[in-house]
């Protein structure tokens, strides 16, 4: 990490190399370390650090973007020149008005980094894995997964006076427990490593695998289904990309097009994008340096808002809501801090009140097959169970589903209390933690279309 002072110097140096009408500089530094295990053994322990700088230049309405993973002054000069050269060959973007302007006083202080993460060493990760493996061996299971940490430094500046800087960190753990013919899964992500209970996660994954032993099949059909938070979050994440996206909204490709102010979901559903929620991955600004703010998206089932970056906002005579992704971004703005309000009952109570139904731990390989209507498909994974007379009676072989998100959220029977953060898997790119705070949801008549052999 280079620190706020040096990040500002790098950004100012880059802006000083350009003759463009406007210029934006994004500096991104990250370091991350991962310990991966399989078959109850650690088999990989790696770490990496990288820096990158992205340059966006504007000549009139022509825009060029270039990036490099070197902060060497000579490389920065070259990258600015590449961005300017690219801009020369672009068509004019008639929708472009300006890069954003921001008052420094508009930024809200957010705690995105805990120093304890610095001391979370490779030995500590190995100790965490030992806890997980001990649980697996106790139950005669094989464990698979990873424990990782990441620190990211993000700076966005432009020639109109924007300067935003933040240092953030996170730790992530995912666990698959496997028996002879069953699996169970658990995961957790947080900014504060002191709040992760590795043993508890392992016990959850192991319990699910044991409950799934010798799964049986069930025919296609519509079933009352309880989706644990890992599965429930995917309903919201597809809405984030395809419904709340301001670009798709104004192009008529969003389900919410012409529906703002109308009730679109069950009246008990409330969804906000809250970058300051305490149990989420708080972050103070977007990738254009625009301050984030809490934004109501669904209030008592009524569609209230969509999100904007500067390009879509200027085009529609709106203000950016602070939802820009990294440039170049042809897809449009996306909310990354979704929070769904919970209900009054625990998951156990929801199960006890289900006469016949299915419990789903999480989804696998989900895709939207109709982005406008929000019809999606996928499979269950790592813990699918049959509920009879208020009890989980056995594990089920995985099922493929095809249903409509909007219709399903209008057939909700109950939400669990105390929504939890479901962290997105860090993946293999630059580290930037995101997640959705969501309860379990119980949906009537969810459509499972076919069964599997596993």
Image (cartoon, grey):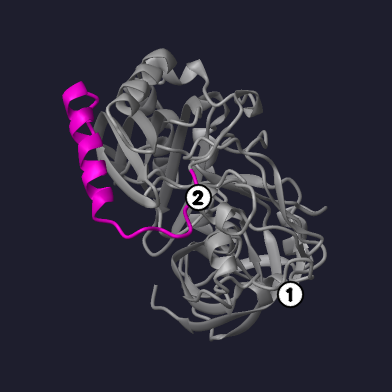
Write the start and end of the magenta stretch as one range.
69-98
Does the magenta-highlighted stretch encompass residue 74? yes
Numbered disc 2: secondary structure:
loop
Q: Which residue corresponds to the image point at 25% horizontal and 35% vertical from the top-left?
A: 80
| Occupied quadrant, residue 36 | top left
Q: Which residue is disc 1 drawn over? A: 411
Q: Is residue 79 above or below residue 164?
A: below
What count of labels does the image hold? Answer: 2
Numbered disc 1: secondary structure:
loop
Q: Position of residue 107 (x, y in %)?
A: 62, 28
- How many angstroms separate mark 1 from mark 2 (CA)? 43 Å
Q: Is residue 144 above or below residue 283?
A: below
Whether residue 118 sits left or right of residue 41 in the image: it is right
Q: Which quadrant of the figure contains the C terminus?
A: bottom left
Q: Which residue corresponds to the image point at 53% horizontal and 30% vertical from the top-left?
A: 191
Q: Is residue 281 above or below residue 182?
A: above
Q: Which residue is disc 2 drawn over? A: 97
Q: Residues within 10 Å of mark 2 (few under 14, many from 20)?
A: some
Residue that protrudes farthest toward the top in the picture: 5
Q: Position of residue 82 (x, y in %)?
A: 20, 41
Mark 1 vs mark 2: give the one in front: 2
The numbered disc on residue 361 is none
Q: Which residue corresponds to the image point at 82% horizontal and 66% vertical from the top-left?
A: 267
Q: Position of residue 333 (x, y in %)?
A: 52, 54
């Amino acid at each position: 990490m280079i620190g706020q002072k040096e990040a500002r110097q790098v950004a100012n140096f880059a802006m000083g190399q350009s003759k463009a009408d406007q210029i934006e500089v994004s500096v991104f530094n990250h370091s991350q370390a991962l310990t991966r295990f399989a078959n109850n053994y650690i088999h990989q322990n790696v770490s990496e650090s990288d820096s990158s700088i992205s340059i966006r230049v504007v000549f009139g309405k022509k825009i060029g973007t270039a990036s490099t993973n070197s902060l060497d002054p000579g490389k920065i000069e070259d990258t600015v020149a590449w961005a300017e050269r690219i801009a020369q060959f672009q068509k004019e973007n008639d929708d472009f008005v300006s890069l954003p302007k921001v008052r420094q006083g508009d930024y809200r202080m957010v705690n995105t980094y805990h120093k304890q993460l610095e001391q979370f060493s490779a030995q500590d990760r190995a100790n965490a894995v030992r806890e997980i493996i001990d649980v697996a061996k106790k139950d005669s299971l094989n464990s698979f997964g990873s424990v990782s940490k990441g620190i990211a430094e993000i700076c966005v500046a432009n020639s109109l006076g924007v300067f935003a800087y933040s240092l953030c960190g996170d730790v992530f753990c995912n666990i698959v427990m496997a028996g002879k013919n069953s699996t169970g899964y658990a995961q957790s992500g947080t900014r504060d490593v002191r709040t992760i209970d590795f043993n508890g996660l392992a016990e959850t994954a192991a319990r699910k695998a044991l409950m799934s032993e010798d799964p049986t099949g069930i025919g296609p059909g519509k079933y009352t289904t309880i989706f644990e938070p890992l599965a429930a979050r995917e309903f919201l994440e597809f809405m984030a990309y395809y419904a709340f996206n301001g670009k798709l909204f104004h192009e008529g490709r969003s389900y919410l097009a012409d529906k703002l102010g109308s009730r679109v979901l069950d009246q008990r559903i409330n969804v906000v994008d809250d970058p300051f929620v305490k149990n989420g991955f708080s972050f103070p600004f977007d990738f254009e340096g625009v301050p984030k703010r809490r934004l109501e998206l669904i209030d008592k089932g009524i569609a209230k808002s969509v999100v904007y970056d500067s390009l879509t906002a200027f085009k529609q005579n709106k203000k950016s809501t602070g939802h820009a992704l990294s440039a170049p971004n042809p897809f449009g703005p996306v909310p990354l801090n979704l929070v769904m309000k919970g209900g009054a009952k625990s998951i156990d109570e929801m199960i006890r009140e289900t006469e016949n139904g299915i419990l789903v731990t999480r989804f696998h390989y989900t895709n939207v097959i109709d982005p406008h209507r929000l019809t999606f498909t996928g499979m269950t994974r790592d813990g699918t169970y049959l509920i009879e007379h208020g009890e989980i009676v056995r594990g089920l072989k995985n099922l493929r589903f095809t249903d409509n998100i909007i219709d399903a959220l209008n057939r909700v029977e109950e939400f669990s209390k105390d929504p939890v953060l479901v962290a997105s898997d860090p993946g293999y790119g630059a580290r930037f933690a995101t997640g959705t705070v969501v309860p379990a949801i119980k949906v009537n008549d969810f459509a499972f279309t076919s069964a599997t052999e596993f």
